[in-house]
Amino acid sequence: MSAQAARPRPAPAAPRAGGPAQWSFAVREFRFWLTDYRRTWRGSVISSVLGPLLYLGAMGLGLGSLVNRHAGGILGVSYLTFIAPGVLAATGMQTAFGETLYPVLGSVKWVQNYFAAAASPLRPADVFRGHLLFVTLRLTMNCGVFLALIAAFGAVRSPLAAAALPAAVLTGLAFAPALMAWSVTRTRDTSFSVLMRFVMVPLFLFSGTFFPVTQLPGWLRPVAYATPLWHGVELCRSLTLGTATWGGAAVHVGYLLAVGAAGCADAGYTYRRRLNE
Amino acid sequence: MSHAEDAEVLVRARGLTKRFGDFAAVDGIDVSIPRGEAFGFLGPNGAGKSSTMRMVGCVSPPTSGELTILGLDPVRHGPAIRSRLGVVPQENNLDVELTVRENLLVYGRYFGLPRSVIRDRSAMLLDFVQLSDRAGDQVDPLSGGMKRRLVIARSLINDPDILLLDEPTTGLDPQARHIVWDRLFRLKQRGVTLILTTHYMDEAEQLCDRLVVMDAGRIAAEGSPRALIERYSTPEVLELRFDPGQHDQAAEKLTALPAQTAERLEVLADRVLVYTRNGDDALAAARGLGLEPVTSLARRSTLEDVFLRLTGRQLDD
Protein backbone atom coordinates (compact mmCIF):
# COMPACT_ATOMS: atom_id res chain seq x y z
CA MET A 1 0.00 0.00 0.00
CA SER A 2 1.14 3.48 -0.69
CA ALA A 3 0.37 4.86 2.72
CA GLN A 4 3.94 6.00 3.09
CA ALA A 5 4.18 7.44 -0.40
CA ALA A 6 4.88 10.90 0.97
CA ARG A 7 8.40 9.95 1.96
CA PRO A 8 10.95 10.80 -0.71
CA ARG A 9 12.91 7.96 -2.19
CA PRO A 10 16.31 7.87 -3.78
CA ALA A 11 16.23 7.68 -7.54
CA PRO A 12 16.94 4.12 -8.61
CA ALA A 13 20.01 3.36 -10.65
CA ALA A 14 19.20 3.26 -14.32
CA PRO A 15 19.34 -0.28 -15.66
CA ARG A 16 22.25 -1.08 -17.90
CA ALA A 17 21.63 -1.20 -21.60
CA GLY A 18 22.59 -4.85 -21.97
CA GLY A 19 23.77 -7.77 -19.92
CA PRO A 20 21.96 -10.14 -17.59
CA ALA A 21 19.30 -7.63 -16.51
CA GLN A 22 17.72 -7.99 -19.96
CA TRP A 23 17.16 -11.70 -19.54
CA SER A 24 15.87 -11.41 -16.00
CA PHE A 25 13.15 -9.11 -17.37
CA ALA A 26 12.36 -11.63 -20.12
CA VAL A 27 12.04 -14.37 -17.49
CA ARG A 28 9.33 -12.30 -15.78
CA GLU A 29 7.30 -12.39 -18.98
CA PHE A 30 8.06 -16.12 -19.39
CA ARG A 31 6.66 -16.74 -15.92
CA PHE A 32 3.45 -14.97 -16.86
CA TRP A 33 2.99 -17.50 -19.66
CA LEU A 34 3.77 -20.40 -17.33
CA THR A 35 1.05 -19.24 -14.93
CA ASP A 36 -1.29 -18.78 -17.87
CA TYR A 37 -0.45 -22.27 -19.18
CA ARG A 38 -1.36 -23.95 -15.91
CA ARG A 39 -5.01 -23.57 -16.93
CA THR A 40 -4.71 -25.14 -20.34
CA TRP A 41 -1.89 -27.66 -20.19
CA ARG A 42 -4.08 -30.76 -19.99
CA GLY A 43 -5.85 -30.07 -23.25
CA SER A 44 -2.65 -29.13 -25.02
CA VAL A 45 -0.81 -32.27 -23.89
CA ILE A 46 -3.67 -34.46 -25.08
CA SER A 47 -3.69 -32.84 -28.51
CA SER A 48 0.10 -32.95 -28.78
CA VAL A 49 -0.03 -36.74 -28.31
CA LEU A 50 -3.23 -37.45 -30.25
CA GLY A 51 -2.39 -35.46 -33.36
CA PRO A 52 0.89 -37.25 -34.08
CA LEU A 53 -0.68 -40.62 -33.27
CA LEU A 54 -3.33 -40.03 -35.91
CA TYR A 55 -0.73 -39.04 -38.51
CA LEU A 56 1.58 -41.91 -37.73
CA GLY A 57 -1.33 -44.35 -37.78
CA ALA A 58 -2.97 -43.15 -40.99
CA MET A 59 0.06 -42.18 -43.07
CA GLY A 60 2.83 -44.26 -41.58
CA LEU A 61 0.99 -47.51 -41.05
CA GLY A 62 -2.08 -47.28 -43.32
CA LEU A 63 -0.63 -45.61 -46.40
CA GLY A 64 2.80 -46.94 -45.47
CA SER A 65 1.75 -50.58 -45.85
CA LEU A 66 0.81 -49.86 -49.50
CA VAL A 67 4.06 -47.98 -50.16
CA ASN A 68 6.12 -50.69 -48.54
CA ARG A 69 4.35 -53.48 -50.45
CA HIS A 70 4.53 -51.84 -53.89
CA ALA A 71 7.73 -49.77 -53.72
CA GLY A 72 9.68 -51.50 -50.98
CA GLY A 73 9.69 -48.37 -48.79
CA ILE A 74 11.56 -45.14 -49.55
CA LEU A 75 15.35 -44.63 -49.53
CA GLY A 76 15.76 -48.16 -48.25
CA VAL A 77 13.63 -47.70 -45.13
CA SER A 78 9.95 -48.33 -44.32
CA TYR A 79 7.53 -45.54 -45.15
CA LEU A 80 6.87 -44.93 -41.45
CA THR A 81 10.57 -44.54 -40.76
CA PHE A 82 10.81 -42.14 -43.71
CA ILE A 83 7.97 -39.80 -42.77
CA ALA A 84 8.41 -39.88 -38.97
CA PRO A 85 11.30 -37.34 -38.87
CA GLY A 86 9.47 -35.25 -41.49
CA VAL A 87 6.36 -35.03 -39.37
CA LEU A 88 8.61 -34.34 -36.35
CA ALA A 89 10.02 -31.24 -38.03
CA ALA A 90 6.54 -30.29 -39.20
CA THR A 91 5.33 -30.60 -35.59
CA GLY A 92 7.88 -27.93 -34.74
CA MET A 93 6.49 -25.71 -37.48
CA GLN A 94 2.85 -26.32 -36.57
CA THR A 95 3.51 -25.71 -32.90
CA ALA A 96 5.17 -22.44 -33.85
CA PHE A 97 2.04 -21.37 -35.75
CA GLY A 98 -0.29 -22.52 -32.97
CA GLU A 99 1.66 -20.82 -30.18
CA THR A 100 2.14 -17.49 -31.91
CA LEU A 101 -0.72 -16.28 -34.14
CA TYR A 102 -3.71 -16.29 -31.79
CA PRO A 103 -1.78 -16.00 -28.51
CA VAL A 104 0.10 -12.93 -29.76
CA LEU A 105 -3.00 -11.27 -31.21
CA GLY A 106 -4.87 -12.05 -27.99
CA SER A 107 -2.07 -10.43 -26.02
CA VAL A 108 -2.69 -7.10 -27.73
CA LYS A 109 -6.40 -7.38 -28.52
CA TRP A 110 -8.38 -9.58 -26.14
CA VAL A 111 -6.43 -10.22 -22.94
CA GLN A 112 -4.09 -7.25 -23.59
CA ASN A 113 -1.51 -8.78 -21.29
CA TYR A 114 1.24 -7.30 -23.47
CA PHE A 115 0.04 -3.79 -22.56
CA ALA A 116 -0.14 -4.72 -18.89
CA ALA A 117 3.47 -5.90 -19.11
CA ALA A 118 4.54 -2.82 -21.07
CA ALA A 119 3.27 -0.57 -18.26
CA SER A 120 5.63 -2.38 -15.85
CA PRO A 121 9.43 -2.10 -16.04
CA LEU A 122 9.45 -4.61 -18.93
CA ARG A 123 10.43 -3.28 -22.34
CA PRO A 124 8.85 -4.48 -25.58
CA ALA A 125 11.96 -6.56 -26.27
CA ASP A 126 11.57 -8.27 -22.88
CA VAL A 127 7.95 -9.05 -23.65
CA PHE A 128 8.98 -10.59 -26.97
CA ARG A 129 11.86 -12.60 -25.55
CA GLY A 130 9.86 -13.87 -22.60
CA HIS A 131 7.05 -15.02 -24.86
CA LEU A 132 9.54 -16.61 -27.27
CA LEU A 133 11.06 -18.51 -24.32
CA PHE A 134 7.63 -19.91 -23.58
CA VAL A 135 7.12 -20.85 -27.25
CA THR A 136 10.47 -22.66 -27.04
CA LEU A 137 9.20 -24.59 -24.04
CA ARG A 138 6.05 -25.59 -25.91
CA LEU A 139 8.14 -26.63 -28.92
CA THR A 140 10.31 -28.80 -26.69
CA MET A 141 7.25 -30.42 -25.13
CA ASN A 142 5.44 -31.17 -28.38
CA CYS A 143 8.49 -32.31 -30.33
CA GLY A 144 9.71 -34.32 -27.33
CA VAL A 145 6.41 -36.18 -27.09
CA PHE A 146 6.48 -36.84 -30.81
CA LEU A 147 10.07 -38.08 -30.81
CA ALA A 148 9.29 -40.45 -27.94
CA LEU A 149 6.29 -41.77 -29.87
CA ILE A 150 8.19 -42.48 -33.08
CA ALA A 151 10.94 -44.16 -31.08
CA ALA A 152 8.25 -46.35 -29.50
CA PHE A 153 6.93 -47.14 -33.00
CA GLY A 154 10.43 -48.31 -33.92
CA ALA A 155 10.79 -45.55 -36.52
CA VAL A 156 14.21 -44.41 -35.30
CA ARG A 157 17.38 -45.98 -36.67
CA SER A 158 20.22 -44.25 -34.88
CA PRO A 159 21.16 -42.89 -31.43
CA LEU A 160 21.78 -39.62 -33.26
CA ALA A 161 17.98 -39.30 -33.12
CA ALA A 162 18.36 -37.67 -29.69
CA ALA A 163 19.70 -34.64 -31.53
CA ALA A 164 16.53 -34.55 -33.61
CA LEU A 165 14.74 -32.94 -30.66
CA PRO A 166 16.79 -29.72 -30.71
CA ALA A 167 16.67 -29.87 -34.50
CA ALA A 168 12.86 -29.93 -34.50
CA VAL A 169 12.73 -27.17 -31.87
CA LEU A 170 15.10 -25.13 -34.03
CA THR A 171 12.78 -25.67 -36.99
CA GLY A 172 9.95 -24.18 -34.96
CA LEU A 173 12.18 -21.32 -33.87
CA ALA A 174 12.88 -20.47 -37.49
CA PHE A 175 9.15 -19.73 -37.87
CA ALA A 176 8.07 -18.40 -34.47
CA PRO A 177 9.85 -15.01 -34.33
CA ALA A 178 8.66 -13.91 -37.77
CA LEU A 179 5.11 -15.06 -37.00
CA MET A 180 5.17 -13.16 -33.71
CA ALA A 181 6.59 -10.07 -35.40
CA TRP A 182 3.71 -10.13 -37.85
CA SER A 183 0.92 -11.13 -35.45
CA VAL A 184 1.67 -8.27 -33.07
CA THR A 185 0.88 -5.80 -35.86
CA ARG A 186 -2.55 -7.34 -36.55
CA THR A 187 -5.84 -5.97 -35.31
CA ARG A 188 -7.98 -8.86 -36.59
CA ASP A 189 -7.53 -12.59 -37.07
CA THR A 190 -9.01 -12.78 -40.57
CA SER A 191 -5.66 -13.38 -42.26
CA PHE A 192 -4.67 -16.20 -39.90
CA SER A 193 -6.74 -18.90 -41.56
CA VAL A 194 -5.43 -17.79 -44.95
CA LEU A 195 -1.88 -18.06 -43.67
CA MET A 196 -2.49 -21.53 -42.27
CA ARG A 197 -4.25 -22.79 -45.39
CA PHE A 198 -1.97 -21.33 -48.02
CA VAL A 199 1.39 -21.27 -46.24
CA MET A 200 1.48 -23.79 -43.43
CA VAL A 201 -0.40 -26.62 -45.12
CA PRO A 202 1.51 -26.43 -48.46
CA LEU A 203 4.78 -26.35 -46.54
CA PHE A 204 3.65 -29.33 -44.55
CA LEU A 205 2.77 -31.29 -47.68
CA PHE A 206 5.57 -30.32 -50.06
CA SER A 207 8.73 -29.83 -48.01
CA GLY A 208 9.91 -33.43 -48.18
CA THR A 209 7.73 -34.51 -45.29
CA PHE A 210 5.76 -37.25 -47.03
CA PHE A 211 7.87 -37.80 -50.19
CA PRO A 212 11.35 -36.70 -51.30
CA VAL A 213 11.34 -33.30 -52.98
CA THR A 214 13.08 -34.95 -55.95
CA GLN A 215 9.54 -36.08 -56.84
CA LEU A 216 8.53 -32.45 -57.37
CA PRO A 217 8.72 -30.91 -60.86
CA GLY A 218 12.20 -29.53 -61.44
CA TRP A 219 11.12 -25.86 -61.37
CA LEU A 220 9.46 -26.28 -58.00
CA ARG A 221 12.40 -27.89 -56.22
CA PRO A 222 14.33 -24.66 -55.56
CA VAL A 223 11.22 -23.32 -53.83
CA ALA A 224 11.21 -26.34 -51.52
CA TYR A 225 14.94 -25.94 -50.83
CA ALA A 226 14.38 -22.34 -49.83
CA THR A 227 11.76 -23.14 -47.18
CA PRO A 228 12.89 -23.49 -43.57
CA LEU A 229 10.74 -26.59 -43.17
CA TRP A 230 12.68 -28.50 -45.85
CA HIS A 231 15.93 -27.79 -43.98
CA GLY A 232 14.33 -28.92 -40.75
CA VAL A 233 12.96 -32.09 -42.33
CA GLU A 234 16.31 -32.98 -43.92
CA LEU A 235 18.13 -32.32 -40.67
CA CYS A 236 15.74 -34.39 -38.55
CA ARG A 237 15.69 -37.22 -41.09
CA SER A 238 19.49 -37.40 -41.30
CA LEU A 239 19.56 -37.68 -37.51
CA THR A 240 16.88 -40.34 -37.03
CA LEU A 241 18.28 -42.39 -39.91
CA GLY A 242 21.87 -41.86 -38.78
CA THR A 243 22.98 -40.49 -42.16
CA ALA A 244 23.90 -36.99 -40.93
CA THR A 245 27.13 -35.36 -42.07
CA TRP A 246 28.77 -32.42 -40.32
CA GLY A 247 28.69 -30.32 -43.44
CA GLY A 248 25.06 -31.01 -44.27
CA ALA A 249 23.93 -30.44 -40.70
CA ALA A 250 25.88 -27.18 -40.50
CA VAL A 251 24.14 -25.85 -43.61
CA HIS A 252 20.69 -26.72 -42.28
CA VAL A 253 21.35 -25.40 -38.78
CA GLY A 254 22.91 -22.22 -40.19
CA TYR A 255 19.94 -21.63 -42.48
CA LEU A 256 17.38 -22.16 -39.71
CA LEU A 257 19.32 -19.91 -37.34
CA ALA A 258 19.56 -17.17 -39.95
CA VAL A 259 15.81 -17.24 -40.64
CA GLY A 260 15.07 -17.19 -36.91
CA ALA A 261 17.48 -14.31 -36.30
CA ALA A 262 15.88 -12.28 -39.10
CA GLY A 263 12.49 -12.86 -37.44
CA CYS A 264 13.87 -11.69 -34.09
CA ALA A 265 15.20 -8.50 -35.65
CA ASP A 266 11.81 -7.86 -37.24
CA ALA A 267 10.00 -8.56 -33.96
CA GLY A 268 12.30 -6.16 -32.13
CA TYR A 269 10.95 -3.47 -34.42
CA THR A 270 7.26 -4.41 -34.57
CA TYR A 271 6.94 -5.04 -30.82
CA ARG A 272 8.40 -1.63 -30.08
CA ARG A 273 6.06 -0.02 -32.62
CA ARG A 274 3.01 -1.67 -31.13
CA LEU A 275 3.76 -1.46 -27.41
CA ASN A 276 5.76 1.75 -27.23
CA GLU A 277 4.22 4.22 -29.63
CA MET B 1 13.87 26.96 -9.28
CA SER B 2 15.66 25.82 -6.14
CA HIS B 3 16.79 22.25 -5.66
CA ALA B 4 14.31 21.56 -2.85
CA GLU B 5 11.35 22.68 -4.93
CA ASP B 6 12.68 20.71 -7.85
CA ALA B 7 12.68 17.46 -5.89
CA GLU B 8 9.01 17.83 -5.10
CA VAL B 9 7.90 18.12 -8.73
CA LEU B 10 7.23 14.55 -9.87
CA VAL B 11 6.10 15.30 -13.42
CA ARG B 12 7.32 18.23 -15.44
CA ALA B 13 6.42 18.83 -19.08
CA ARG B 14 7.49 21.77 -21.23
CA GLY B 15 6.18 22.09 -24.76
CA LEU B 16 5.34 18.40 -24.67
CA THR B 17 4.16 17.23 -28.08
CA LYS B 18 3.03 13.93 -29.55
CA ARG B 19 2.45 13.61 -33.27
CA PHE B 20 1.08 10.71 -35.25
CA GLY B 21 2.02 11.61 -38.80
CA ASP B 22 0.61 15.08 -39.42
CA PHE B 23 -1.82 14.90 -36.53
CA ALA B 24 -0.72 16.48 -33.25
CA ALA B 25 -2.50 14.49 -30.53
CA VAL B 26 -0.73 16.57 -27.88
CA ASP B 27 0.31 20.00 -29.06
CA GLY B 28 2.88 21.60 -26.79
CA ILE B 29 1.58 21.40 -23.22
CA ASP B 30 3.26 22.64 -20.03
CA VAL B 31 2.47 20.82 -16.80
CA SER B 32 4.09 20.57 -13.35
CA ILE B 33 2.71 18.10 -10.85
CA PRO B 34 4.07 18.18 -7.29
CA ARG B 35 4.21 15.20 -4.97
CA GLY B 36 0.98 14.46 -3.15
CA GLU B 37 -1.30 16.32 -5.56
CA ALA B 38 -4.38 14.88 -7.23
CA PHE B 39 -4.07 16.26 -10.74
CA GLY B 40 -6.59 15.88 -13.54
CA PHE B 41 -6.70 16.14 -17.30
CA LEU B 42 -10.28 17.03 -18.17
CA GLY B 43 -11.47 17.02 -21.73
CA PRO B 44 -13.66 15.30 -24.31
CA ASN B 45 -12.62 12.16 -26.18
CA GLY B 46 -9.81 12.93 -28.57
CA ALA B 47 -8.51 15.92 -26.57
CA GLY B 48 -5.10 14.27 -26.11
CA LYS B 49 -5.56 13.10 -22.52
CA SER B 50 -4.70 9.46 -23.13
CA SER B 51 -1.73 10.30 -25.35
CA THR B 52 -0.42 12.48 -22.54
CA MET B 53 -0.94 9.71 -20.02
CA ARG B 54 0.90 7.22 -22.23
CA MET B 55 3.88 9.58 -22.43
CA VAL B 56 3.85 10.06 -18.66
CA GLY B 57 3.53 6.27 -18.30
CA CYS B 58 6.72 5.92 -20.39
CA VAL B 59 5.09 3.72 -23.03
CA SER B 60 5.06 6.39 -25.72
CA PRO B 61 8.12 8.52 -26.47
CA PRO B 62 7.39 12.26 -26.89
CA THR B 63 7.79 13.63 -30.40
CA SER B 64 9.26 16.86 -29.02
CA GLY B 65 9.40 18.99 -25.91
CA GLU B 66 10.73 18.20 -22.47
CA LEU B 67 9.38 15.60 -20.10
CA THR B 68 10.83 14.46 -16.79
CA ILE B 69 9.17 12.01 -14.45
CA LEU B 70 10.57 11.49 -10.95
CA GLY B 71 13.47 13.57 -12.16
CA LEU B 72 14.34 11.09 -14.92
CA ASP B 73 14.13 11.10 -18.71
CA PRO B 74 11.42 8.64 -19.80
CA VAL B 75 13.19 7.72 -23.02
CA ARG B 76 16.47 6.77 -21.34
CA HIS B 77 15.14 5.50 -18.01
CA GLY B 78 11.74 4.03 -18.94
CA PRO B 79 12.09 0.80 -16.91
CA ALA B 80 13.39 2.65 -13.83
CA ILE B 81 10.49 5.13 -13.94
CA ARG B 82 7.87 2.49 -14.69
CA SER B 83 9.02 0.49 -11.69
CA ARG B 84 7.75 3.39 -9.53
CA LEU B 85 4.46 4.05 -11.35
CA GLY B 86 1.08 2.46 -10.85
CA VAL B 87 -1.06 2.38 -13.98
CA VAL B 88 -4.82 1.98 -14.30
CA PRO B 89 -5.37 1.87 -18.06
CA GLN B 90 -8.57 2.86 -19.79
CA GLU B 91 -9.43 -0.77 -20.53
CA ASN B 92 -9.15 -3.39 -17.80
CA ASN B 93 -6.33 -5.54 -19.17
CA LEU B 94 -6.84 -8.27 -16.60
CA ASP B 95 -6.33 -11.92 -17.42
CA VAL B 96 -9.96 -12.85 -16.95
CA GLU B 97 -9.29 -16.58 -16.91
CA LEU B 98 -6.91 -16.33 -13.98
CA THR B 99 -8.14 -15.78 -10.43
CA VAL B 100 -8.20 -12.42 -8.70
CA ARG B 101 -5.13 -13.36 -6.64
CA GLU B 102 -3.25 -14.77 -9.65
CA ASN B 103 -3.71 -11.48 -11.49
CA LEU B 104 -1.91 -9.71 -8.67
CA LEU B 105 0.76 -12.41 -8.63
CA VAL B 106 1.62 -12.20 -12.33
CA TYR B 107 1.61 -8.42 -12.22
CA GLY B 108 3.77 -8.27 -9.09
CA ARG B 109 6.26 -10.56 -10.82
CA TYR B 110 6.62 -8.05 -13.65
CA PHE B 111 8.13 -5.78 -11.00
CA GLY B 112 10.47 -8.47 -9.77
CA LEU B 113 8.76 -8.64 -6.36
CA PRO B 114 9.32 -11.78 -4.29
CA ARG B 115 6.33 -14.08 -3.90
CA SER B 116 6.09 -13.44 -0.15
CA VAL B 117 5.90 -9.67 -0.68
CA ILE B 118 3.26 -10.10 -3.36
CA ARG B 119 1.26 -12.38 -1.10
CA ASP B 120 1.28 -9.92 1.80
CA ARG B 121 0.50 -6.89 -0.33
CA SER B 122 -2.22 -8.74 -2.22
CA ALA B 123 -4.05 -9.54 1.02
CA MET B 124 -3.82 -5.91 2.09
CA LEU B 125 -4.81 -4.50 -1.30
CA LEU B 126 -7.74 -6.86 -1.80
CA ASP B 127 -8.97 -5.81 1.60
CA PHE B 128 -8.59 -2.17 0.58
CA VAL B 129 -10.66 -2.62 -2.60
CA GLN B 130 -13.16 -4.89 -0.83
CA LEU B 131 -12.42 -7.98 -2.89
CA SER B 132 -10.95 -10.25 -0.19
CA ASP B 133 -13.85 -12.68 -0.41
CA ARG B 134 -13.32 -13.05 -4.17
CA ALA B 135 -9.55 -13.64 -4.02
CA GLY B 136 -9.76 -17.23 -5.22
CA ASP B 137 -12.42 -16.61 -7.89
CA GLN B 138 -11.89 -16.29 -11.60
CA VAL B 139 -11.99 -12.69 -12.83
CA ASP B 140 -14.35 -13.24 -15.75
CA PRO B 141 -17.66 -13.32 -13.85
CA LEU B 142 -16.84 -10.28 -11.68
CA SER B 143 -18.90 -7.11 -12.22
CA GLY B 144 -17.44 -4.12 -14.04
CA GLY B 145 -16.97 -2.24 -10.78
CA MET B 146 -15.15 -5.18 -9.18
CA LYS B 147 -12.84 -5.55 -12.15
CA ARG B 148 -12.06 -1.86 -11.97
CA ARG B 149 -11.25 -2.12 -8.28
CA LEU B 150 -9.02 -5.11 -9.00
CA VAL B 151 -7.11 -3.08 -11.60
CA ILE B 152 -6.66 -0.36 -8.98
CA ALA B 153 -5.38 -2.93 -6.45
CA ARG B 154 -3.05 -4.31 -9.12
CA SER B 155 -1.69 -0.84 -9.88
CA LEU B 156 -0.68 -0.48 -6.21
CA ILE B 157 1.22 -3.80 -5.98
CA ASN B 158 4.60 -2.08 -6.42
CA ASP B 159 3.81 0.64 -3.85
CA PRO B 160 4.06 3.31 -6.54
CA ASP B 161 5.11 6.96 -6.15
CA ILE B 162 2.59 8.07 -8.74
CA LEU B 163 -0.74 6.50 -9.65
CA LEU B 164 -1.89 7.12 -13.24
CA LEU B 165 -5.59 6.59 -13.87
CA ASP B 166 -6.96 6.83 -17.41
CA GLU B 167 -10.73 7.32 -17.26
CA PRO B 168 -11.03 5.46 -13.95
CA THR B 169 -14.84 5.18 -13.88
CA THR B 170 -15.89 5.29 -17.53
CA GLY B 171 -18.51 2.63 -18.19
CA LEU B 172 -19.38 2.01 -14.53
CA ASP B 173 -22.85 2.38 -13.09
CA PRO B 174 -23.33 5.23 -10.56
CA GLN B 175 -23.01 3.05 -7.47
CA ALA B 176 -19.82 1.38 -8.70
CA ARG B 177 -18.40 4.79 -9.57
CA HIS B 178 -18.97 6.04 -6.05
CA ILE B 179 -17.14 3.05 -4.57
CA VAL B 180 -14.16 3.68 -6.87
CA TRP B 181 -14.20 7.39 -6.00
CA ASP B 182 -14.25 6.55 -2.33
CA ARG B 183 -11.16 4.33 -2.68
CA LEU B 184 -9.32 6.92 -4.75
CA PHE B 185 -10.21 9.60 -2.25
CA ARG B 186 -8.69 7.47 0.53
CA LEU B 187 -5.49 7.10 -1.46
CA LYS B 188 -5.41 10.84 -1.95
CA GLN B 189 -5.86 11.35 1.79
CA ARG B 190 -2.85 9.13 2.34
CA GLY B 191 -0.76 11.43 0.20
CA VAL B 192 -0.53 9.29 -2.95
CA THR B 193 0.09 11.42 -6.02
CA LEU B 194 -2.84 10.80 -8.38
CA ILE B 195 -2.87 11.79 -12.03
CA LEU B 196 -6.10 11.06 -13.79
CA THR B 197 -7.92 11.75 -17.01
CA THR B 198 -11.65 12.06 -17.16
CA HIS B 199 -14.47 13.46 -19.21
CA TYR B 200 -16.73 13.51 -16.17
CA MET B 201 -16.79 16.93 -14.54
CA ASP B 202 -18.15 15.50 -11.30
CA GLU B 203 -15.22 13.10 -11.12
CA ALA B 204 -12.78 15.95 -11.65
CA GLU B 205 -14.54 18.12 -9.07
CA GLN B 206 -14.57 15.39 -6.45
CA LEU B 207 -11.04 14.11 -6.84
CA CYS B 208 -8.77 16.79 -8.29
CA ASP B 209 -6.88 19.42 -6.33
CA ARG B 210 -5.94 20.97 -9.62
CA LEU B 211 -6.68 20.24 -13.22
CA VAL B 212 -6.12 21.32 -16.77
CA VAL B 213 -8.89 21.52 -19.32
CA MET B 214 -7.64 19.99 -22.56
CA ASP B 215 -9.06 20.58 -25.98
CA ALA B 216 -7.60 19.51 -29.34
CA GLY B 217 -4.21 18.68 -27.84
CA ARG B 218 -3.78 21.96 -26.00
CA ILE B 219 -4.39 23.19 -22.47
CA ALA B 220 -7.29 25.63 -22.48
CA ALA B 221 -7.19 26.50 -18.77
CA GLU B 222 -5.59 25.42 -15.52
CA GLY B 223 -6.52 25.70 -11.86
CA SER B 224 -8.47 24.16 -9.01
CA PRO B 225 -12.06 23.20 -9.87
CA ARG B 226 -13.36 26.06 -7.72
CA ALA B 227 -10.99 28.64 -9.21
CA LEU B 228 -11.84 27.57 -12.75
CA ILE B 229 -15.55 27.86 -12.08
CA GLU B 230 -15.10 31.30 -10.52
CA ARG B 231 -12.94 32.53 -13.38
CA TYR B 232 -14.89 31.14 -16.32
CA SER B 233 -18.46 30.88 -15.11
CA THR B 234 -21.10 32.58 -12.97
CA PRO B 235 -22.16 31.24 -9.56
CA GLU B 236 -25.40 29.83 -10.92
CA VAL B 237 -26.88 28.57 -14.14
CA LEU B 238 -30.52 28.57 -15.16
CA GLU B 239 -31.40 25.77 -17.57
CA LEU B 240 -34.50 26.39 -19.64
CA ARG B 241 -36.23 23.91 -21.95
CA PHE B 242 -38.75 25.03 -24.49
CA ASP B 243 -40.76 23.21 -27.11
CA PRO B 244 -38.59 21.79 -29.89
CA GLY B 245 -37.52 24.46 -32.37
CA GLN B 246 -38.28 27.32 -29.98
CA HIS B 247 -34.83 27.67 -28.46
CA ASP B 248 -33.33 30.25 -30.81
CA GLN B 249 -36.43 32.37 -30.58
CA ALA B 250 -36.41 32.17 -26.77
CA ALA B 251 -32.71 33.01 -26.64
CA GLU B 252 -33.39 36.04 -28.81
CA LYS B 253 -35.91 37.31 -26.28
CA LEU B 254 -33.60 36.51 -23.35
CA THR B 255 -30.95 38.87 -24.72
CA ALA B 256 -33.23 41.66 -23.46
CA LEU B 257 -32.32 40.68 -19.87
CA PRO B 258 -29.87 43.07 -18.18
CA ALA B 259 -26.29 41.89 -17.80
CA GLN B 260 -26.47 41.60 -14.02
CA THR B 261 -29.32 39.08 -14.42
CA ALA B 262 -28.00 37.16 -17.41
CA GLU B 263 -24.28 37.57 -17.98
CA ARG B 264 -24.18 35.13 -20.83
CA LEU B 265 -26.42 32.74 -22.81
CA GLU B 266 -25.62 29.38 -24.35
CA VAL B 267 -28.07 27.77 -26.76
CA LEU B 268 -27.70 23.99 -26.80
CA ALA B 269 -29.63 21.47 -28.87
CA ASP B 270 -32.10 20.71 -26.09
CA ARG B 271 -31.97 23.72 -23.74
CA VAL B 272 -30.90 27.31 -23.20
CA LEU B 273 -28.40 28.08 -20.43
CA VAL B 274 -28.57 31.43 -18.68
CA TYR B 275 -25.38 32.26 -16.76
CA THR B 276 -26.36 34.31 -13.76
CA ARG B 277 -25.66 35.22 -10.15
CA ASN B 278 -29.04 33.97 -9.04
CA GLY B 279 -31.03 31.38 -10.96
CA ASP B 280 -34.38 32.07 -9.33
CA ASP B 281 -34.16 35.78 -10.06
CA ALA B 282 -33.23 35.03 -13.66
CA LEU B 283 -36.22 32.71 -14.01
CA ALA B 284 -38.55 35.40 -12.67
CA ALA B 285 -37.03 37.89 -15.11
CA ALA B 286 -37.47 35.46 -18.01
CA ARG B 287 -41.13 34.98 -17.11
CA GLY B 288 -41.41 38.75 -16.96
CA LEU B 289 -40.45 38.76 -20.65
CA GLY B 290 -43.43 36.50 -21.33
CA LEU B 291 -41.41 33.31 -21.74
CA GLU B 292 -42.92 30.09 -20.43
CA PRO B 293 -40.31 27.31 -20.45
CA VAL B 294 -41.52 23.68 -20.40
CA THR B 295 -39.06 22.94 -17.62
CA SER B 296 -36.58 25.05 -15.73
CA LEU B 297 -33.72 24.25 -13.37
CA ALA B 298 -31.54 26.62 -11.36
CA ARG B 299 -28.23 25.02 -10.38
CA ARG B 300 -24.66 25.88 -9.42
CA SER B 301 -22.02 26.18 -12.08
CA THR B 302 -19.87 23.14 -12.78
CA LEU B 303 -16.75 22.35 -14.78
CA GLU B 304 -19.08 21.41 -17.61
CA ASP B 305 -19.93 25.11 -17.87
CA VAL B 306 -16.24 26.01 -17.76
CA PHE B 307 -15.60 23.64 -20.62
CA LEU B 308 -18.53 24.98 -22.62
CA ARG B 309 -17.28 28.52 -22.11
CA LEU B 310 -13.73 27.65 -23.13
CA THR B 311 -14.44 25.51 -26.16
CA GLY B 312 -18.01 26.24 -27.18
CA ARG B 313 -18.71 22.51 -26.95
CA GLN B 314 -20.07 20.10 -24.40
CA LEU B 315 -17.75 17.55 -22.78
CA ASP B 316 -19.58 14.51 -24.04
CA ASP B 317 -19.86 15.75 -27.64
Image (spheres, rainbow, N blue to C red):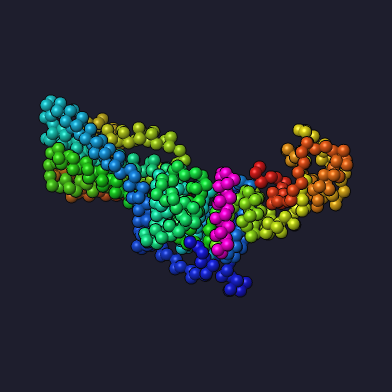
B307 displayed left or right of B248 = left
Name, please, the residue furthest toward the front.
Answer: B133
Give the magenta-colored segment's residue range. B169-191
Q: Position of residue A142 (x, y in %)?
A: 26, 43
Main secondary-structure element of the magenta-colored stretch: helix
A273 or A105, which lies in front? A105
Task: Please tell me in which quadrant of the rendered image residue B69 appears.
Answer: bottom right
A170 versus A198 height, above or below? below
B190 versus A139 height, above or below? below
Q: Residue at x 55, y 60 (%)?
A: B187
Q: Position of residue B192 (x, y in %)?
A: 55, 62
A24 versus B270 height, above or below? below
Q: Residue at x 74, y 48 (%)?
A: B299
Asked whether residue B75 appears in the rendered view, the answer is no
Q: Position of residue B98 (x, y in %)?
A: 39, 47
B14 versus B218 height, above or below? below
Task: Please tell me in which quadrant of the rendered image residue A75 appears.
Answer: top left
Q: Position of residue A182 (x, y in %)?
A: 41, 43
Q: Is residue B186 magenta?
A: yes
Q: Is residue B172 magenta?
A: yes
B192 displayed left or right of A27 = right
Q: Residue at x 22, y 41 (%)?
A: A146
Q: Residue at x 39, y 51 (%)?
A: B102
Tell how many labels: 0
